[in-house]
Image (cartoon, grey):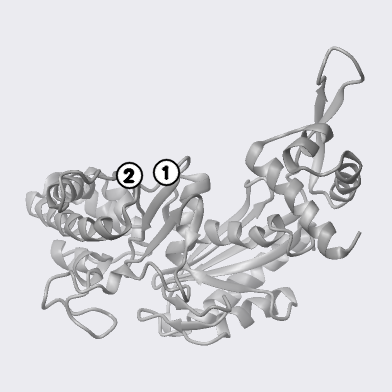
């Protein structure tokens, strides 16, 4: 059996266990279309690698010996995800079953040294993984901007001023790798996380909207990310649908994120920014309970959000929209007006109003999705277990 065929077959078995749950060897043969002998050989290799384990005995019929049910092991193989943002960097380690094995978030003290901060956290994660005896399948970094087709080169990040392959190279160095780290858009990664772990579970047509200094979108269609011709799909924050005179971090005026991003919200309520968007929004939500002016300002942000979502919905037609980042702690303060304006602004009466939901994963969503993206190549049979 060639290495390519072996990897593809192993990926099919692993994906079946992840998506469809535990199974006997005979059941895996039926699910994947692989011969029973092939499944047996693959399972043996995966057990040796700490990727699968025996769960229980099952009987497939009235006769014959019971089979051993297999499941993904919470063991050595892991995917690692990082996020670089204006206010914080984060890292998440996930095993093949999707269980989080390690997480860390650190405030950014100097945005001019974002690569250095990310390198420090990567060094710490690499040490943690080594001590735990885990085997990284790969690592992915999520950043708020446009990434070229090589999934490694940053083309444009207006709020961080990152460019090139520096982020990937710094993380590669932490693990002793060469050209293994991938870089993806943060909204795309967060959409994957909410799809598998959060508010988007069970959705087939999902739009995830980030809520930090920047506003971006990740689109899932039929359970898979839609990235566009060059991987740039979802850059909705710089659509000219905001307040005409509002200045954006990209240097232009009228961008949507200049009206509904974190800094726009703080300017509207007159409160300072704290360590993370989530912490900041919690304080704003508390203040809004006692201060009608703060509440009214947040509700106006929600209405502007709904206006933009109506435009995006008219183009993309999602069934579910998940609001992440700083929108989550604000809850109905922003969700209710956004939902009302969205429903009232859709152009045609036959259009279905998407199910508007708050995200469930907080500031670690993009890092968690990046970790899941790191495992994708393994499930697709493109790489080995380590």
**Tag 1–tag 2 contact (CB < 8 Å):** yes
Residue 362 image label: none
Image position of 157 (left or right of 297)? right
Picture residue at 60% right of the left edge, 79% below the top: 168
Picture residue at 18% right of the left edge, 68% below the top: 259
Report the Cα–Cα distance between label 1 and label 2.
Answer: 7 Å
Q: Is residue 364 visible?
A: no
Picture residue at 39% right of the left edge, 70% below the top: 87
Location of residue 314 (image quadrant): bottom left
Which residue is disc 1 drawn over?
Answer: 199
Is residue 212 or residue 256 the one in the foreground?
Answer: 256
Measured from the top left, where is residue 310 in percent x and y?
Answer: 21, 56
Picture residue at 9% right of the left edge, 52% below the top: 296
Residue 357 image label: 2
312 shown above or below 240? above
62 shown above or below 45? above
162 shown above or below 46? below
């Amino acid at each position: 059996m060639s290495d390519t065929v072996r990897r593809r077959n192993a990926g099919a078995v692993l994906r079946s266990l992840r998506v469809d749950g535990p199974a006997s060897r005979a059941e895996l043969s039926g699910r994947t279309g692989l011969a029973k002998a092939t499944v047996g050989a693959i399972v043996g290799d995966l057990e040796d690698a700490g990727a699968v384990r025996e769960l229980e005995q099952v009987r497939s019929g009235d006769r014959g010996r019971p089979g051993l049910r297999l499941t993904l092991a919470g063991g050595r193989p892991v995917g690692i995800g990082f996020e670089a943002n204006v206010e914080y960097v984060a890292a998440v380690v996930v095993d093949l079953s999707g269980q989080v094995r390690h997480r860390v978030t650190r405030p950014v003290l100097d945005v001019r040294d974002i690569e250095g901060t990310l390198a420090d956290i990567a060094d710490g994660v690499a040490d943690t993984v080594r001590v735990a005896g885990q085997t990284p399948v790969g690592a992915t970094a999520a950043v708020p901007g446009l990434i070229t087709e090589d999934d490694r080169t940053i083309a444009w990040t207006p709020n961080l001023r990152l460019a090139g392959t520096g982020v990937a190279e710094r993380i590669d160095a932490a693990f002793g790798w060469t050209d293994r780290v991938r870089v993806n858009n943060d909204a795309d990664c967060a959409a994957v996380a909410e799809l598998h772990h959060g508010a988007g579970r069970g959705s087939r047509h999902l739009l995830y909207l980030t809520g930090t200094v920047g506003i971006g979108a990740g689109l899932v269609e039929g359970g898979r990310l839609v990235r566009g011709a060059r991987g740039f799909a979802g850059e909705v924050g710089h659509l000219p649908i905001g307040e005409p005179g509002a200045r954006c971090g990209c240097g232009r005026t009228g961008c949507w994120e200049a009206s509904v991003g974190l800094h726009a919200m703080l300017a509207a309520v007159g409160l300072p920014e704290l360590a993370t968007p989530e912490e900041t929004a919690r304080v704003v939500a508390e203040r809004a309970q006692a201060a009608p002016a703060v509440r009214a300002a947040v509700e106006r942000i929600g209405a502007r959000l709904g206006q933009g979502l109506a435009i995006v919905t008219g183009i993309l037609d999602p069934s579910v929209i998940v609001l992440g980042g700083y929108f989550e702690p604000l809850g109905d303060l922003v969700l209710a007006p956004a939902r009302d304006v969205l429903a009232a602004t859709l152009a045609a009466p036959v259009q279905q109003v998407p199910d508007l939901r708050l995200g469930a994963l907080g500031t670690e969503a993009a890092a968690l999705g990046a970790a899941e993206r790191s495992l994708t190549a393994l499930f697709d049979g493109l790489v080995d277990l380590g």
